[in-house]
Image: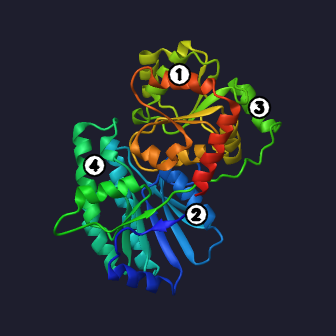
Amino acid sequence: MTECVTQDSASEIEEFQKQCCTTVQHVFIVGSKGIPGKYGGYETFVDRLTGCHESNQSIKYHVACKASENGEFEYHAAHCFEVKVPDIGPAQAIWYDVAALNYACRYIEKNGIEHPIVYVLACRIGPFCSHFQKRIHALGGMLFVNPDGHEWARAKWSAPVRHYWKTSEAAMARHCDLLVCDSRGIEKYIHEEYDSDSYAPKTTFIAYGADVSSSFLADDNPKLLSWYADKGLTPKGYYLVVGRFVPENNYETMIREFMASGSERDFALITNVSEGFLAELKTRTGFDHDSRIKFVGTVYDRDLLAKIRENAYGYLHGHEVGGTNPSLLEALGTTDLNLLLDVDFNREVAKNTALYWTKEPGNLAALIKRADAMDMGEVASLGRQAKARIAE
């Protein structure tokens, strides 16, 4: 990953970095659902981050994992601590983060850890952030925050919850030592929204990455062929989407437009289906009467998923809320032809290496028709450009 500091860090952060160089750096990550085997951008990030640093003796990760019982285990040489979370509805996420932070602070104090970094993913705990920043400072550490995207804009939240998210974001932007943004668009938004005459959040931009190497699986691999046979798919005979099954990822638009496109290919959706949202989509689109629309479940085997991506004719990406999305990066690193929702975050990542669509009725359907008719040389050229973009 590459780093670009866009605002001068305060002297205390620079001094903190010097101190950290003399000891093993302990990093406590709070806010993902945990690792391994979870879908989501943060979960992918934490899994790959710990995996890449598994043999690095100078850094030790401690990862909070949402669970039904408290416990501890090791994965990728990271200390994973399970936090039992009660079934209390939308407040679960806040309770989880607070409980995980309390655990981290107790662990730091009990084990005499020097200069820890506590890295919170997403802005859920604004009302508690000042308290935890002071507590972490008293332990000799610093509090970093990844602000994610516009969580307050997600369709699944009610108006009061959205208001809480926005207020929480503002508090966390103020009461942390550094905001780590994986999108320049999010970093720009943070400063436009929260800079004032009396305070400006400290931010840094760290570019996300993805693997651009080919899958280890051969075209005739039994595991791959079995998966295709089970799902009724063939190489280059399907469009693909991989992601969380939530409204703001525009599943309804993608399904409706694909059905209207008349494509002879299939549309394979790899996602963790929720029955409520699935029932809504059936009512609104009637996709269950179209044999091309295939909900194929989840795929946690990384090599198999990479090969499924490689063999897709095209990838559809409808993510609308948030910053850089790992699923998009993985698609650009593996699938030649990518059809992306035309929003700033997606253009920032893919630039001119993909095709873009809007939510205007008929727009995506027309683009799918165009994609189906593209010359394979043109498709291959876009694929090479996309891989080069990810490598960059």
Mark 1 — residue?
Answer: 258
Quadrant assignment, res 180: bottom left
Q: Earlier in the sequence, mark 4 or mark 2?
A: 2
Residue 124 sits above or below residue 20 on the image: above
Q: Is residue 6 left or right of residue 272?
A: left
Disc 3 to disc 1: CB gap under 8 Å: no
Residue 323 visible in the shown view? yes
Mark 3 vs mark 1, foreground winner is 1
Mark 2, Cα crowd under 10 Å, few <14 / some 14-19 / many 20+, is many
Q: Earlier in the sequence, mark 3 or mark 1?
A: 3
Disc 3 to disc 4: CB gap under 8 Å: no
Q: Disc 1 to disc 2, how far (Cα)?
A: 37 Å
Q: Earlier in the sequence, mark 3 or mark 4?
A: 4
Q: Is residue 252 left or right of residue 391?
A: left
Residue 87 horizontal/vertical position (percent): 38, 44
- Which numbered disc covers residue 226? 3
Q: Disc 4 to disc 2, how far (Cα)?
A: 28 Å
Residue 337 horizontal/vertical position (percent): 61, 36
Instruction: Tell me the amino acid under the disc marked 4.
Output: Trp
Q: Disc 3 to disc 4, how far (Cα)?
A: 44 Å
Q: Secondary structure at mark 3?
A: helix
Mark 3, Cα crowd under 10 Å, few <14 / some 14-19 / many 20+, is few
Instruction: Tell me the amino acid under the disc marked 1.
Output: Phe
Mark 4 — residue?
Answer: 165
Mark 4, Cα crowd under 10 Å, few <14 / some 14-19 / many 20+, is many
Q: Disc 3 to disc 1, how far (Cα)?
A: 26 Å
Mark 2 — residue?
Answer: 50
Q: Nearer the viewer, residue 281 or 374?
A: 374
Q: Earlier in the sequence, mark 1 or mark 4?
A: 4
Residue at x 50% of width, y 46% of height: 351
Residue at x 48% of width, y 14% of height: 286
Q: Disc 2 to disc 3, how far (Cα)?
A: 31 Å
